[in-house]
Amino acid sequence: MLIQDKTGGAKEGIRMSSIKILVAGHFNAGKTTFVNTASEIKTVSTEKSITHSKEKEYKGKTTTAMDYGEVSINGKKLAVFGIPGQERFSFMWKILSKNTQGFVFLLDSTAPDMWKDTVRQIDMLTRYAEVPYIIAANKQDLPNALGVSVVRERLNIADDIHIVPCIAKEREVVSDTIEVLLSKVNS
């Protein structure tokens, strides 16, 4: 796998193509972490303090519009957008899905009670943009994480949909996840 550095990318004379991908998923699935880990530039983030008491139990801030980063993988420049997971920010989903070439739907493998929100996003976003997508079962480093086969079974995901194990804090895992999506985008 070739991940280019932050200094500019491809060798002189080689034009890099640009691909827009969207990272979606339920609240607290790890979308901001995924974008931050993937990005070779300082990410643009719209995180704000959480005001909903139930959500405060999980973390102190949440994305309100988007996260944005850039990464170059195998000579391709990617614009990586993370979207907010809560329904109240869903007005951003249609806006950000415009010109998207692929989705990574992230879910927290330790929180199956939240997976229905990711399924709702899959249904909605794939209507906005009929593009390839994969599901990434995040937080696989935690002891109570459910495996890919359990995710597939519980959500009744068809065999032709890629579900990959993910740890959004690990750059190599995030890069591998993006490469799985790219293989579908390029096919």
Image (cartoon, rainbow, N blue to C red):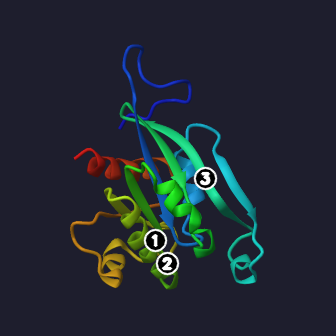
Residue 41: which quarter of the image? top right
Q: Is residue 183 visible?
A: yes
Q: Which residue is tagged 3?
A: 67
- Nearest the eye: 68 or 155: 68
Percent x, y for residue 132?
A: 31, 57
Q: Which residue is mark 1?
A: 121
Alpha carbons under labels 3 and 2: distance apart: 19 Å
Helix, strand, or loop for circle 2?
helix
Q: Residue at x 66, y 62 (%)?
A: 63
Q: CA distance from mark 2 to mark 1?
A: 6 Å
Pointers 2 and 1 in contact (C-beta within 8 Å): yes
**Mark sitting on residue 117:** 2
In the rendered view, does 145 fall on the left or right side of 89? left
N-terminal of the two: label 3 or label 2?
Answer: 3
Q: Residues within 10 Å of mark 3 (few under 14, many from 20)?
A: many
Where is the N terminus found, in terms of image quarters? top left
Residue type at the position of mark 2: Asp
Q: Earlier in the sequence, mark 1 or mark 3?
A: 3
Q: Amino acid at mark 1?
A: Gln
> How far from the left and from the top, in percent, is residue 55?
69, 78
Q: Secondary structure at mark 3?
A: strand
Q: Is residue 112 left or right of residue 84?
A: left
Residue 168 visible? The answer is no
* Quadrant assignment, res 29: bottom right
Please tell me which residue is depicted at 76% across the width and 82% down the height of the picture: 53
